[in-house]
Amino acid sequence: MKAKPFLALTAVTKSFVPGFPVLQDVSLGFRKGEVHAILGENGAGKSTLLNILFGMHQADAGGILLAGREVVHHSPADAIANRIGMVHQHFKLVRSFTVAENLRLAAPPAIRPSLRRHADIARLAKGFGLDIDPRAVVASLPLSMQQRVEILKALINQAELILFDEPTTILNPAEIEAFYAVLRQIAAEGRAVVVVTHHLNEVIAHAQHASVIRRGQLISSGPVAGRAREDFVREMVGHEVDLSAPLPNSGLGRGAAELSLRDVTLAPTPSSSGLKHMSLDVHAGEVVGIAGVEGNGQRELFDIVAGLRRPDAGSVQARRQHADGRPVAGLVPEDRHQEGLVLDLPVSVNLLLNKIGEAPYARGGRLMHGKITAQAERMRADSDVRARSVHVTPRILSGGNQQKIVLARALNEDAAIVVVYQPTRGLDVAASEEVLRRLRAAANAGKAVLFISSNLDEIMRISDRIVIFYAGQAVGEVGRDASRAAVGALMTGGAHA
Ligand SMILES: Nc1ncnc2c1ncn2[C@@H]1O[C@H](COP(=O)(O)OP(=O)(O)OP(=O)(O)O)[C@@H](O)[C@H]1O
Ligand SMILES: [Mg+2]
């Protein structure tokens, strides 16, 4: 017989707005020694569930049983006292402090003396399989290392259950493998691990137990062994989804070059490969995919096309440009919180951000609220943004629904060029498919789409041409029918097969 759960939710119900339950009657247990994955569409209630466990929200009904005893978490301090740790999507670290300082800050007083020396911290971290430099300032660390600090904080607080909200969206494939090796060790040592993720391949490879939530209700909870991707997708979405549906191009070929980079050069810095003599055209009617291991010039390319940085040498030309020379383009930036959304303005304003000052949305200096709402409502319905109305702010929306707003706006621009950077990051499987389908349709309708992503599968499915980046250079270009192996070899600096 299986061990009793260390922690269980009993019939938890939660609404933020009366009449709109986000979780309904959810009962679920987490056992020590297991990695337990929580799956569900964007907005299903996954983060809310973790936040209730961690004391950030309170359930309206139902409760939490810890080793069979009813407990109440009024705040994260209560949860931490009950040996629960959480690694949030957006880290809660003091960025100007060192790793050691952050750990001391988070540690209970009794533990602090043992964290005084850097060597002791390094040894402690290593014991958990986490290599990290205690002297490093957090802001200077890559996200994968910052995540390790968060994991260490939980472990130092002697957490017996650690909650992770979409921990791998910020990691590259090698970092993801290393991350799950750490989780396996943490669980094997007798802790319970809960991971919210949209990546079903990770669940199948690394989780022992999986629970699916759909629109606030628990659909299934059981062992992962013997289950297939398609089973999970059906439970998440509520119907069959064909994830291998083709994304055909229009067959009409391409039109004029809408965007042309010539010999664009950006000096490298310690944290960036820069760009070296980058020349690239994107034509009307095509999707050009940029493939490469993260950090090989993709961010620099986005920044240059978006007009956020100017090249040190070379030129960027677009058929339509703003007065300052920036290409007129619909943009989906990588970091939707920092660059994509104004989190405290309504969804309607976010959807129409670049148009809000013009007719028909403004007349004689006055905003035409009726026009704004009507158009925003149309865009919301089209893009399946799950928000109660366009008057709420994106801050309260789930991560995936925030991203849908950014994409809807980019496609609604009066621009021939669309530039997207990691457009499906944080999106559920069905929503990711929808994004790819929309971008392909935009190209087929004549837009020039520049598709920058670290997800090679997506790039291969949507692109007409794939340009491979390595060390700030375009090291190769292949067509629709190229093999994954050929692209993979170029991505790691190998020669064209
Ligand atoms: N503070 C809040 N006020 C009002 N509504 C909220 C609040 N927090 C979350 N919600 C709503 O609760 C629902 C569930 O959100 P939640 O963040 O739990 O989804 P999720 O499953 O984590 O989605 P994602 O995969 O996109 O992160 C959403 O409809 C969201 O808009
Ligand atoms: Mg979430």
Image: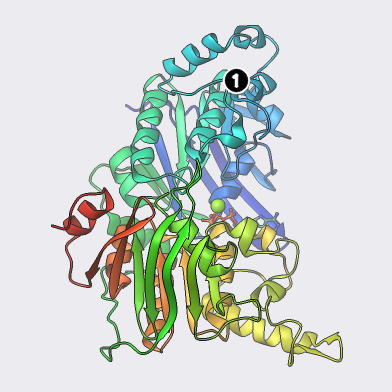
Residue 151 falls left or right of residue 76: left
The N terminus appears in which quarter of the rendering? top left
Total numbered labels placed on residues in the image: 1
Q: At 50% across and 43% down in the image, what residue appears?
A: 271
User: Taking 429 as reference, is 253 left or right?
Assistant: left
Which image quarter is the C terminus in?
Answer: bottom left
- Asked if 122 appears above or below 390 in the picture, the reply is above
Can you see residue 215? no
Residue 448, relative to residue 470: is it above or below?
below
Residue 363 occupies which quadrant of the picture?
A: bottom right
Instruction: Out of 135 and 356, give the one closest to the viewer.
Output: 135
Decide if ligand 2 comes within 8 Å of the CB at mark 1: no
Q: Amino acid at mark 1?
A: Asn
Which residue does the image show at 57% across and 80% down from the upper left?
Answer: 328
Q: Quadrant of residue 263?
A: bottom left
Q: How is the image coloured?
A: rainbow
Left or right: residue 42 versus residue 497 is right
Residue located 41% across and 88% down the image: 446
**Image spot of residue 160 (x, y percent):** 51, 23
Q: Residues within 10 Å of mark 1 (few under 14, many from 20)?
A: some
Which residue is identified by label 1? 157
Residue 162, image x and y in percent?
52, 31
In the rendering, at what x and y percent does residue 191 appear?
Answer: 45, 24
282 or 124: nearer the eye? Answer: 282
Q: Nearer the viewer, residue 381 or 340?
A: 340
- Tell me the SS state at disc 1: loop
Q: Residue at x 40, y 26 (%)?
A: 187
What is the x, y in percent for residue 57? 69, 44
Furthest residue toward front: 313
Residue 286 in view here: yes
